[in-house]
Image (tube, grey):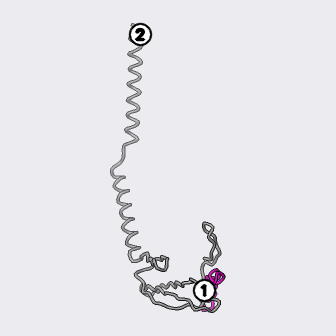
Amino acid sequence: MRGTALAWLISLNWQRAQKKKTCRIAKRRSYNPMRLIRVAATISILCIAGSSLAQDWIEYVDRAERFSVSLPGQPTVTSSTYVSEDGKILPARVYTAQDGPRLYSVTVVNYAGADVTVVRGSIAYAAWNFRKRGGEVTYDAFAQVDRIEGHQ
């Protein structure tokens, strides 16, 4: 009799423990549907607003010149020349895009065949010319990224 009563008591305690675990698991997995709706609505509004704000800007890629730039629309490309620091005339292209009253312009110079020292000093020389015309350079530093040194 004692063994049967003891087995029944152990079984009863085990069943109660299992019920408590089930209740705890159910409480952890429960969710508020209104909260889920609010989160989904917030995410969708942010996605729509983000895409509408960045709608006009594109990532322009020129594979021939090996560069990419973000512009407010498809740029117009004009061929030009650029005079380097040592006086050599180098081929260049000017990429221009307009956004209302704002004009964005990127000049890409092909330094193929130029002296290494001219290439290394090219950004400093371009910044010096820009300052000479009254412009302001907001970031001017020498850096190294993945062991590739250069002026930014």
When the figure is inspected, residue 62 is found, relative to residue 82, above or below; the finding is above
Residue 112 position by quadrant:
bottom right
The rendered magenta stretch, by its main secondary structure, is classed as: helix
Image point (65%, 75%), residue name: 142
Q: CA distance from mark 2 to mark 1?
A: 95 Å
Q: Is 129 covered by the magenta stretch?
A: yes
> Quarter of the image holding residue 97?
bottom left
Task: Tell me the amino acid under the disc marked 1.
Answer: Ala
**Label 1: few (<14), some (14–19) or many (≥20) C-alpha neighbours in 10 Å:** few
Which quarter shows the C terminus? bottom right
Question: Residue 75's x, y, as percent?
Answer: 42, 84
- At horizontal 40% and vertical 81% (from top left) the residue drawn is 73
Which residue sits furthest front?
113
What residue span does the magenta drawing correspond to? 115-135
Question: Nearer the observer, disc 2 or disc 1?
Answer: 1
Q: Residue at x 46, y 85 (%)?
A: 95
Q: Counting residues from the N terminus, which is met first, the one under dot 2 or under dot 1?
A: 2
- Say which quarter of the image contains residue 47: bottom left
Percent position of residue 2, x then y: 41, 8
Left or right: 80 in relation to 14: right
Residue that numbered label 1 is attached to: 126
Between 152 and 86, the residue placed more toward the observer is 86
118 and 150: which is toward the camera: 118
Mark 2 Cα shell of 10 Å, populated few (<14), some (14-19), many (≥20): few
Q: Secondary structure at mark 2?
A: helix
